[in-house]
Image: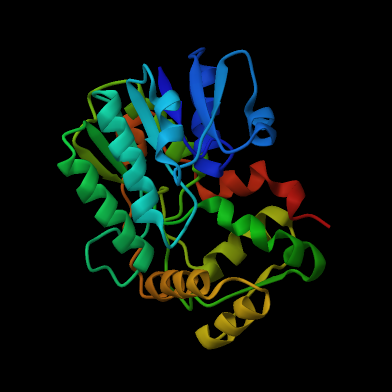
């Protein structure tokens, strides 16, 4: 049995679909009956549990041989994901495929990257088989600009000319699904990217080309972005993480392109232009 945490999130949900599309039965860990209803299907068994409640993980892990570990950003991330690793170790020899992210390294200037590295180390030391997947930036993050682009043909950020090798979540899920269904990738850590590194001005150019009208990127100072996020009600810790992201991305820390998606799955990673064409109606007036 394969267990998916974060089953109603982007990566977890996409991985769930990849596996069920292959005809595989999957178990989904969800936090409520309402969320269970969102992923219900003949091939999906749902179990209600929470990473913050270790005992609730026992039933979810019963009989599981492989599990996807992904959870939302949280200042308690190391503790929460550690709870899952401990429960998986008690359950038996579960192959844990962990989703990490930008700047994953101990001592990383990206605090979430430091959290991910702590968990990767804990998982590696647990004795469980593991695979670490490190996508730096989702193409789906660009969708948050869709309302502004529809309204006035512009979007705002603080990345300057920094280039980002962004990746479609479906490609992350394809790699995760492959790792979950074979032992060939155990003990590996993969940086996952799309086929090109783009700056936000490049993103604007691609959008303009596909939409047939001008889209403009407006760069603003990082402090301006920080104040806007705080004014939106985002918690201070989350604002700090977002500032970390922008600082790292603007410095080109996510500009390296890998071919891991094709090497693992046999299919090239989607280009950003393909992604935009698949979601074009979200950007049209």
Q: Which is nearer the eye, 216 or 71?
A: 71
How many numbered marks appear?
0
Give the image quarter of residue 156: bottom right
- Which color scheme is applied? rainbow
Residue 200: image location, x then y, percent: 53, 68
Q: Which is nearer the eye, 132 or 141?
A: 132
| Quadrant containing the N terminus in the rendered view | top left
**41 above or below 242?**
above
Give the image quarter of residue 172: top left
Residue at point 53%, 87% (across, down): 223
Residue 179: image location, x then y, percent: 32, 29
Compared across the picture, whether 31 is left or right of 216 comes to left
The reply to whether residue 103 is visible in this rendering is: no
Q: Which is nearer the eye, 162 or 88?
A: 88
Residue at point 23%, 24% (across, down): 93
Compared across the picture, whether 170 is left or right of 104 comes to right
Give the image quarter of residue 275: top right
| Quadrant containing the C terminus in the rendered view | bottom right
Compared across the picture, whether 66 is left or right of 57 comes to left
**10 above or below 154?**
above
Residue at point 41%, 35% (across, down): 55
* Residue furthest to the front: 55
The reply to whether residue 165 is visible in this rendering is: yes
**47 above or below 211?**
above
Residue at point 18%, 35% (across, down): 187
Residue 158: image location, x then y, percent: 52, 78
Residue 214: image location, x then y, percent: 72, 68
**126 above or below 40?**
below
């Amino acid at each position: 049995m394969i267990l998916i945490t974060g089953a109603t999130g982007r990566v977890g949900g996409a991985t769930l679909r990849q596996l069920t599309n292959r005809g595989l039965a999957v178990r989904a860990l969800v936090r409520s009956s309402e969320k269970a209803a969102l992923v219900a299907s003949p091939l999906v068994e749902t179990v209600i549990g929470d990473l913050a409640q270790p005992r609730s993980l026992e039933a979810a892990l019963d009989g599981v041989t492989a599990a996807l570990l992904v959870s939302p950003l949280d200042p308690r991330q190391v503790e929460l994901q550690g709870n899952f690793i401990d429960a998986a170790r008690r359950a038996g020899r579960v192959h844990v495929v962990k989703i990490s992210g930008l700047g994953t390294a101990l001592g990383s200037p990206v605090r979430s990257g430091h959290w991910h590295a702590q968990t990767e180390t804990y998982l590696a030391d647990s004795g469980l088989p593991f695979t670490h997947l490190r996508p730096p930036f989702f193409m789906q993050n660009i969708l948050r600009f869709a309302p502004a682009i529809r309204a006035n043909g512009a979007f705002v950020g603080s990345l300057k000319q920094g280039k980002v090798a962004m990746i479609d979540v479906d490609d992350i899920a394809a790699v995760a699904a492959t790792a979950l269904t074979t032992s060939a990738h155990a003990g590996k850590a993969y940086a996952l990217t799309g086929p090109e590194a783009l700056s936000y001005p490049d993103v604007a150019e691609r959008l303009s080309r596909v939409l047939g009208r001008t889209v403009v990127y407006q760069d603003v100072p990082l402090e301006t972005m920080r104040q806007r996020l705080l004014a939106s009600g985002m918690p201070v810790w989350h604002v700090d993480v977002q500032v970390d992201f922008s600082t790292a991305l603007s410095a080109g820390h996510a500009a390296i392109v890998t071919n891991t998606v094709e090497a693992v799955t046999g299919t090239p990673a989607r280009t950003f232009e393909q992604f935009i064409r698949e979601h074009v109606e979200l950007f049209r007036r």
